[in-house]
Image (cartoon, helix red, strand yellow):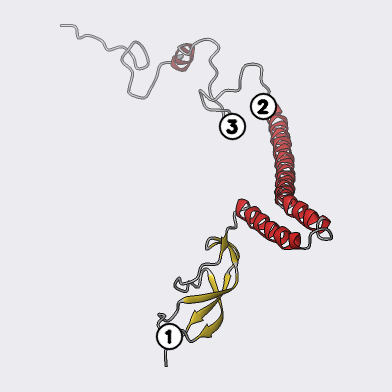
Amino acid sequence: MTSARRPPPGTGNDHPRGNRPVGADQSAATDRPVGEARPAGGERPAGVEHPAGADPRDEPAALAARIEELTASWRQALADLDNQRKWCAREVEREREAERARAATAWLPVLDHLELALAHAGADPDSILTGVRAVRDQAVEALARLGYPRHDEVGVPFDPARHDVVSLVDEPGTPPGTVVAVVRPGYGDAGRQLRPVGVAVSKPSE
């Protein structure tokens, strides 16, 4: 009985593990698509490619251009802010001038009444008193229109926010701390006061 002869080592498909046939590397290499290069050290990973036609050496120039653009925008913003600040300063000054003009205009009728009183003083001396009273009333009205009404109330409790004590007086039958006389009228309210009321206040009985 003739036994089957085994093929010599290295022939056919029966080769030891790890002993690849000649040409295996070449066939594996031919399995890679045509044109696909093997990644080499220092090259970009797959999927991180430069745009088509872009030169990596252009990146510093692009960054420098972007920095220059942002710097120009920053300088423009500073210039705009400075212009806005100057405009606000001009507007504030213009409003102050307008407010001063309104205040001065409110006093023009007062001057007119003084002129009339002086004009008639020689012909009618009694008209001086009438003219002075008219001027006083006109001035009070002007202050009220400017937001500073006159206050000269008597018999009210002393209020440190509105009153300035000029003197303390004995006033029998009057509760202590009551305004018994106005020495100097005040103008304005507690939140917007031009001058407090100068008053005499009743002192506690001893």
Q: Viewed as shown, does residue 26 lie left or right of 50?
A: left
Vertical comparison of 40 with 168: above or below: above
**Front position in the image: 85 or 95:** 95
User: What residue lies at 55% left-to-right and 67% top-to-bottom?
Assistant: 152
Q: Viewed as shown, does residue 200 lie left or right of 57?
A: left
Q: Position of residue 150 (x, y in %)?
A: 58, 61
- The CA distance from mark 1 to mark 2 is 102 Å
Q: Position of residue 197 (x, y in %)?
A: 57, 70
Q: Amino acid at mark 2?
A: Pro
Q: Which mark is residue 180?
A: none
Q: Viewed as shown, does residue 116 lie left or right of 177?
A: right
Q: Position of residue 42 (x, y in %)?
A: 59, 32
Vertical comparison of 200 with 194: above or below: below
Q: Which mark is residue 42?
A: 3
Q: Earlier in the sequence, mark 3 or mark 2?
A: 3
Q: Which residue is the site of mark 1? A: 172
Q: Which residue is the site of mark 2? A: 56
Q: Secondary structure at mark 3?
A: loop
Residue 70 lies in quadrant:
top right
Determine crowd level at label 3: few under 14, some 14-19, many 20+ residues with C-alpha closer than 10 A.
Answer: few
Q: Viewed as shown, does residue 5 lie left or right of 65?
A: left
Q: Earlier in the sequence, mark 1 or mark 2?
A: 2
Q: Residue furthest left?
A: 1
Q: Amino acid at mark 3?
A: Gly
Comparing labels 3 and 2, the label whose residue is closer to the camera:
2
Q: Secondary structure at mark 2?
A: helix
Q: Are marks 3 and 2 in contact (CB under 8 Å)?
A: no
Q: Amino acid at mark 1?
A: Pro
- The CA distance from mark 3 to mark 2 is 14 Å
- The CA distance from mark 1 to mark 3 is 107 Å
Determine crowd level at label 2: few under 14, some 14-19, many 20+ residues with C-alpha closer than 10 A.
Answer: few
